[in-house]
Image (cartoon, rainbow, N blue to C red):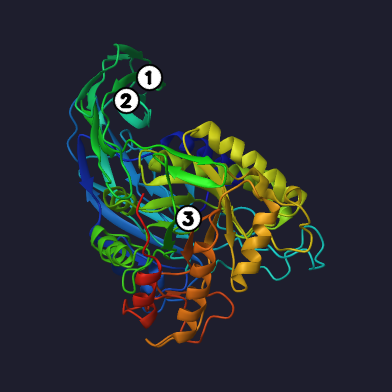
Amino acid sequence: MKPPASKRLLIFALLLCACLPACASQRIDLDGAGWTFKTATSDGPVAVSVPSSWLTMDGYRSFIGDGMYDRDFQSPTLQPGQIIRLHFDAVYDVANVWLNGHFLGTHDGGYTPFEFDVTKLLVPGTNHLTVEASNVPTLTTTIPTLATSHGSQRSDNFGSASNATIVGWMPYGGIVRPVSLLITDAVYIRNVKVDAQPDLTTGTATLKVQLWLHNGGATAIDSAPQGSIAGITISFPPTHVAAGSDVVLHWSSSLSRAHLWSVKDPFLYQASVQVPGDQWSSSIGVRDIRVQGTQLLLNGTPVHLFGANRVSEDPKEGLRESPAIIDRDLSDMLADNMRMMRIAHYPQAPDLLDFADKHGMLIIAEAGNWDLGAWQMADSGLRALWKQQMQEMMREDWNHPSVIAWSVGNEYESYTPQGLAWTRDMRAYTLKVDPTRLITFASRFTSDPAVKTGKDEASQYSDFVSINIYGNYAQRFDHAHELYPDKPIFVTEFGKMGEPGLEDPLRIQDISEAVAAVKARPWMIGASLWTWADYRSLFHGTPPNGIRNWGVVTFDRQHRDSWSAVQKLFKTDLP
């Protein structure tokens, strides 16, 4: 039932331009009841509600394989000239989609949106939708991959997959985020990018807006988009959009006496763009983020903040990231003075970044490369897939002021020639897509024996160095500073596993040691605990109950003693 590889590659290319925040004049939800789920080993289909993560379902809690989702829906009535798109916020990890028996395409990547124009495939009355989702990891054809990263003292041959491991979090297969039908006129908004850069001396901000329009109809159409930003009217010139084509429009202006977005005062302006039959809106922030020497500056103020990683899951709902789940979890993190973090190894739900925007949190967004070996990073197909997923994440997240940096990976073999090349190349690629943010990656190899100088490791290409460190904090922080004396250093991971109960004195001792070492070093800009809460995992070394006990909060969201200790330790002046 799966398409051949050649067809998947073609559809992959077509989908690149279709992965964007969903905008529409009319949205029809396909969530909730009405779906069925089955696998090849099931007795038969069972009724499920979408979004759905099958690793939360009885009988499937450790199932790695392919799952089939089916549902019927009634065709909506379209007005002449309207088109309709089938939009998925995310399906983990590889999705194949059919409508009324017609294969629509494949999407690789379990955390980013994709869609299909289904205008010509709908039939009057009942329509049948089938989605096949796979959470099977591979070495080079899916992201996240099976991990093969290791230190220089291992003797594996180049290209070896020995000791490959599954991701450290749960690969929650399924239609994990909402599904909808989007109805617009033929010319609709694909995406909008707003850049708001303040001049800290004059107080005036330069506003730039890029607008992507697509004509999904059969005839050329003239369009004159309008909008507003921070109360200023946006007026694009009338534009001729050929049938089946895209246009990119640009607009710029200035905003005097701009109210800056900051951690202390996360002020947001409103922006919107309209074309007949479609509209886009977003909150945007005006802020300046830059590195100066060994300092990270937000609006000219040095940043010294703490935070925590959060594995995206709910004890009952799995990977479903509903607004209520996000508000519950992020509110608890905020109350624990967690404000700056590389929050996870993959793209986040839009509602999480909306929360961060509104409450003044700083996020390092990361996609894809988790613990890749050198030979994996040399694979041309894997490099192309990573670029696809990175671009999809960036296009969805680039209007969030809380996102201050893009990470090009985590704990890959950054001491190898392939790791250095990856970082250099993906930095260049990322800045081409969005030149307005900083670039980093989370390294665990700054202390590797192969790294004698800063030129031996890929953090030389980072705007600020990010390191994952467990234990022996002061010495290892100082060693990283010796390698990169002119760069700020952020700790993307630290912490201690164990102590499943609510009393955890060893964890408190470990966190206290790390925080004291960070605060004593002015070139360190902060640290992000691994993790805020315990999480499920199939990773080796996980206790028999399937829960990895890293958090200051238990899997069922109870505070450990370390939560109160962290609240005090993480308290700092807010920039």
Q: Quarter-wise, where is residue 478 in the image?
A: bottom right
Which amino acid type corresponds to the residue marked 3 in the rendered image? Tyr
Decide: few, some or many residues near mark 2? Use Cα within 10 Å; few <14, some 14-19, many ≥20. some
Q: Are marks 3 and 2 in contact (CB under 8 Å)?
A: no
Task: Say which of 413 and 224 sits in front.
Answer: 413
Decide: few, some or many residues near mark 1? Use Cα within 10 Å; few <14, some 14-19, many ≥20. some
Marks 3 and 2 sit apart, C-alpha to C-alpha, by: 35 Å
Q: Quarter-wise, where is residue 102 in the image?
A: top left
Q: Is residue 386 left or right of residue 226?
A: right
Is residue 238 visible in the rendered image? The answer is yes
Decide: few, some or many residues near mark 3? Use Cα within 10 Å; few <14, some 14-19, many ≥20. many
Which amino acid type corresponds to the residue marked 1 in the rendered image? His
Q: Position of residue 388 (x, y in %)?
A: 53, 42
In the image, what residue occupies the spot 51% across and 33% down? 433
Q: Earlier in the sequence, mark 1 or mark 3?
A: 1
Which amino acid type corresponds to the residue marked 2 in the rendered image? Thr
- Check disc 3 and report the residue beneath it: 346
Is residue 369 visible in the rendered image? The answer is no
Which label sits on residue 204?
2
Task: Say which of 539 and 514 sits in front.
Answer: 514
In the image, what residue occupies the spot 60% across and 74% down? 471
Q: Position of residue 64 (x, y in %)?
A: 51, 69
Marks 1 and 3 sit apart, C-alpha to C-alpha, by: 30 Å
Task: Say which of 392 and 563 sits in front.
Answer: 563
- Mark 2 vs mark 1: in front: 2
- Check disc 1 and report the residue beneath it: 250
Q: Secondary structure at mark 2?
A: loop
Q: Position of residue 134 (x, y in %)?
A: 49, 60
Q: Position of residue 483 (x, y in %)?
A: 70, 53
- Mark 3 vs mark 2: in front: 2
Q: Is residue 455 left or right of residue 75?
A: right
Q: Earlier in the sequence, mark 3 or mark 2?
A: 2
